[in-house]
Image: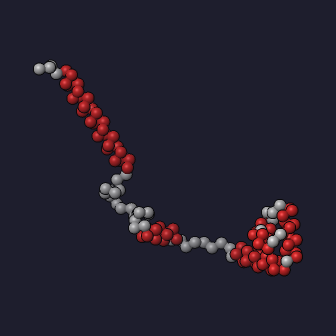
């Protein structure tokens, strides 16, 4: 087994995720190669250092800060500040849809009434 392959398998070797035959090949290489063994020890040391850092809680206002940055960078396209009252941009699509549906129904009723009056009216 070559050095690059062994180095690519450090993580799986450390976690015991390799099949037994592959594990033996990696371990045999580490036992016989001082350079790879030293690099594996460095890998283990770095992994332990990161693991031992523990959990750090994020700042309380982190979410608001991120939203503000996104809002500024996107020029208000994302996380736009909510305004009070209704303006053209704040009218929900549902209301606009209801108005269009009501107008369409009104036109249909008007057309039906006009047609029925024409059918009843005497011809000249």
Residue at the image position 81 percent from the left and 71 percent from the top:
2
The answer to whether one can see residue 52 in this image is no
Residue 72 rendering spot, x and y as whole percentages? 42, 70
The answer to whether one can see residue 33 in this image is yes
Residue 120 rendering spot, x and y as whole percentages? 19, 21
Residue at the image position 68 percent from the left and 73 percent from the top:
54
Between 7 and 96, the one nearer to me in the picture: 7
Picture mark count: 0
Vertical comparison of 35 with 67: above or below: below
Q: Is residue 37 left or right of residue 63?
A: right
Between 22 and 83, the one nearer to me in the picture: 22
Residue at the image position 85 percent from the left and 72 percent from the top:
29
Q: Is residue 110 left or right of residue 10?
A: left
Residue at the image position 33 percent from the left and 40 percent from the top:
101
Q: Is residue 101 left or right of residue 24?
A: left
Between 74 and 69, the one nearer to me in the picture: 74
- Quadrant for the C terminus, please: top left
């Amino acid at each position: 087994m070559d050095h690059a392959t062994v180095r690519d398998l450090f993580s799986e070797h450390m976690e015991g995720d390799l099949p037994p035959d592959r594990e033996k090949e990696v371990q045999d290489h580490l036992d016989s190669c001082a350079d790879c063994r030293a690099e594996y020890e460095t890998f283990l040391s770095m992994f332990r250092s990161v693991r031992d850092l523990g959990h750090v809680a994020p700042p309380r206002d982190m979410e608001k800060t991120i939203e503000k940055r996104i809002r500024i960078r996107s020029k208000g396209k994302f996380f736009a500040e909510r305004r009070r009252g209704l303006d053209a941009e704040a009218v929900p699509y549902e209301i606009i849809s209801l108005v269009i549906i009501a107008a369409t129904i009104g036109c249909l009723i008007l057309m039906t009434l006009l047609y029925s009056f024409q059918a009843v009216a005497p011809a000249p």
